[in-house]
Image (tube, rainbow, N blue to C red):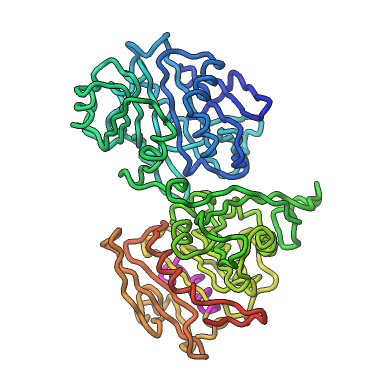
């Protein structure tokens, strides 16, 4: 479902935006306070909190805005880059209101990778260029409900239960519709929950009221006073719902990790096919590139000469989502490096990535010999692009879960000059159960890519294979067995087997690790990234371009 009509749009002097529209008859406001997170460039829709408010009574737009500011919800919004949805009852209060409001909201949430603005996902159909529809930008992955008075009664009566259905999250899979956390304030009716795992913050209720919640819900935190910022940091913001279960969410403020959005204007390079197609109509000399920087708050990023990990997202998700779900900020915190996740990197060429690194080196004290890059899915293709087009910039590359013919780049065109002789330490992983091409067992283009890799990295053992001879391969997943093969185990995915193939180079050193994983779909797993970092972190590139350990 989409919103076909916005009844009113108000833009405040500070840049805050308020939309008024109807969701299945419920008057709804979306309030996007102005922030410093560049939320119209950096996409928080995949991972930021979706904050839904059920007020005690029907609010005017001015009352809603005042409530958001005085309650602290607006400040939470400013810190997280996502808007606040206020759902009004059809009557004056929620008393006697039938269920339907939460369903209307979840049906109108959507993820948009590029067409988003002021908390709205803008939905367009090329077949009907004059038709524009809208969805609230967000998902139920971090659905946090705040309910007050009769709104608390309405929510506790109808929605403290598992909600059927799911929503699509691009490359990241599907999101369950059940809320994650619910803050109930000043309810009068006894709650009527079904057995569920929802975490509840109960404010100003009797022991009997709280006992009902404790008998049927997940974690229950009882408060006498209302402090939404405190509860977000200590309780609410620490959880998300993933694959139908409540799990730990990143909460970087609590984890002592800086997460800072930024952008830079970069000159359009001659290898940027996106803008090359537009030059005949409207020449573009530069374009804005957004990125998010993560590092431990105690890391000396101004004088410390620290390593840099560039992260590139999949073709159906976002910079923040890929970096966070892969736990690169946490790995960087433990290992002392800066993580930089690039937004909409499919519009950024390999040469522009190199220019972005130059820019980052003016902002932070980065060790030029310890620059790394990784990516998931389409971001994996971008990592292969960097191997082909600017290998000398990197101490190692970590493409993951995607593989294509040599010379095929993220723009869907051919790269003119492909690296043939600059060795780059490399880690690669592919999942057996992926719907795409990730391993030699999937398609000949994976074989071609790894044959090319073996030549550039000068494998001591030749890498040659044919799909026609698949039954006679040395290894059923990788085709050619590494000089050494290690079998790994991940407690989070006990059914999977991780086969790590180490390929030695002609100089006797091992610069290449290829991994195939059983019972592994097209997905991100933190275990893989931690293992990959342990392999590549020992490499550095000297000033004269030589890779050393």
Which residue is found at the position 67% from the left and 82% from the top? 544
Q: Pick whichever, 60 or 166, lies toward us.
A: 60
Q: Residue 273's spot in the image, x, y percent?
A: 70, 58
Q: Residue 450's spot in the image, x, y percent?
A: 50, 76
Please state if 54 lies on the left or on the right of 82 as rendered.
Answer: left
Instruction: Magenta stretch: give its range.
Output: 437-453
- Magenta segment includes 266: no
Please state if 271 lies on the left or on the right of 506 as rendered.
Answer: right
Please state if 528 lies on the left or on the right of 126 as rendered.
Answer: left
Which residue is found at the position 26% from the left and 16% from the top? 189
| 256 is higher (above) or lower (below) than 95 | below
Which image quadrant for residue 386?
Answer: bottom right
Which image quadrant for residue 157?
Answer: top left
Q: Pick whichever, 464 or 260, lies toward us.
A: 260
Q: Pick whichever, 125 or 218, lies toward us.
A: 218
- Magenta segment includes 445: yes
Please state if 384 lies on the left or on the right of 443 as rendered.
Answer: right
| 341 is higher (above) or lower (below) than 251 | below
Q: Residue 473's spot in the image, x, y percent?
A: 37, 80
Residue 291 in sight: yes
| 126 is higher (above) or lower (below) than 190 | below
Which residue is found at the position 33% from the left and 23% from the top? 155
Which residue is found at the position 43% from the left and 46% from the top? 254
Q: How many marks do you count on the picture? A: 0
| 333 is higher (above) or lower (below) than 130 | below
Residue 115 in sight: no
State the residue lying farthest toward the top. 92
Q: Residue 347's spot in the image, x, y percent?
A: 65, 53
């Amino acid at each position: 479902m989409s919103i076909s009509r916005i009844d009113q749009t108000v833009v405040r002097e500070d840049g805050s935006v308020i939309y008024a529209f109807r969701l299945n008859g419920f008057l709804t406001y979306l309030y996007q306070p102005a922030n410093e997170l560049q939320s119209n460039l950096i996409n928080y829709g995949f991972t930021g909190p979706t904050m839904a408010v059920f007020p005690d009574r029907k609010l005017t737009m001015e009352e809603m805005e005042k409530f958001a500011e005085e309650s602290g919800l607006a400040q939470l919004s400013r810190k997280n880059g996502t808007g606040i949805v206020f759902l009004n009852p059809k009557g004056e209060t929620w008393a006697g209101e039938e269920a339907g409001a939460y369903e209307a909201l979840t049906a109108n949430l959507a993820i948009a990778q590029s067409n988003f603005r002021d908390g709205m996902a803008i939905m367009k159909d090329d077949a009907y260029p004059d038709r524009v529809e809208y969805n609230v930008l967000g998902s139920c992955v971090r659905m946090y409900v705040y309910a007050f008075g009769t709104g608390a009664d309405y929510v506790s009566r109808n929605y403290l239960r598992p909600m059927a259905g799911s929503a699509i999250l691009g490359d990241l899979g599907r999101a369950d519709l059940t809320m994650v956390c619910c803050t109930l304030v000043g309810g009068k009716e006894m709650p009527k929950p079904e057995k569920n795992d929802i975490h509840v913050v109960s404010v100003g209720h009797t022991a009997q009221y709280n006992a009902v919640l404790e008998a049927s819900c997940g974690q229950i935190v009882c408060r006498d006073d209302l402090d939404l910022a405190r509860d977000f940091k200590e309780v609410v913001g620490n959880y998300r719902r993933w694959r139908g279960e409540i799990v730990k969410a990143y909460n970087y403020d609590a984890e002592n990790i800086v997460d800072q959005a930024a952008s830079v204007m970069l000159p359009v390079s001659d290898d940027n096919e996106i803008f090359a197609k537009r030059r005949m109509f409207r020449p573009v000399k530069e374009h804005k590139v957004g990125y998010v920087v993560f590092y431990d708050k105690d890391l000396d990023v101004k004088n410390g000469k620290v390593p840099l990990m560039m992260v590139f997202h999949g073709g159906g998700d976002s910079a923040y989502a890929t970096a966070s779900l892969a736990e690169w900020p946490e790995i960087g915190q433990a290992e002392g490096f800066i993580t930089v996740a690039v937004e909409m990197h499919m519009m950024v060429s390999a040469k522009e990535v190199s220019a972005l690194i130059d820019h980052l080196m003016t902002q932070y004290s980065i060790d030029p010999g310890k620059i790394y890059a990784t990516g998931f899915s389409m971001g994996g293709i971008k990592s292969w692009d960097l191997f082909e087009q600017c290998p000398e910039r990197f101490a190692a590359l970590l493409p993951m879960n995607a593989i294509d013919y040599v010379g095929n780049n993220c723009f869907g065109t051919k790269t003119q000059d492909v690296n043939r002789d600059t060795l780059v330490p490399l880690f690669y992983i592919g999942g057996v159960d992926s719907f795409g091409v990730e391993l030699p067992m999937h398609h000949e283009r994976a074989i071609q890519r790894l044959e090319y890799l073996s030549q550039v990295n000068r494998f001591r053992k030749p890498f040659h294979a044919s799909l026609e001879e698949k039954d006679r391969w040395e290894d059923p997943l990788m085709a050619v067995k590494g000089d050494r093969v290690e079998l790994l185990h991940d407690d989070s995915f006990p059914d999977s087997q991780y086969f790590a193939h180490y390929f030695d180079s002609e100089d006797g050193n091992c610069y290449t690790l290829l991994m195939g994983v059983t019972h592994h779909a097209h997905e991100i797993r933190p275990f893989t990234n931690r293992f990959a970092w342990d392999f590549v972190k020992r490499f550095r590139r000297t000033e004269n371009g030589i890779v050393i350990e």
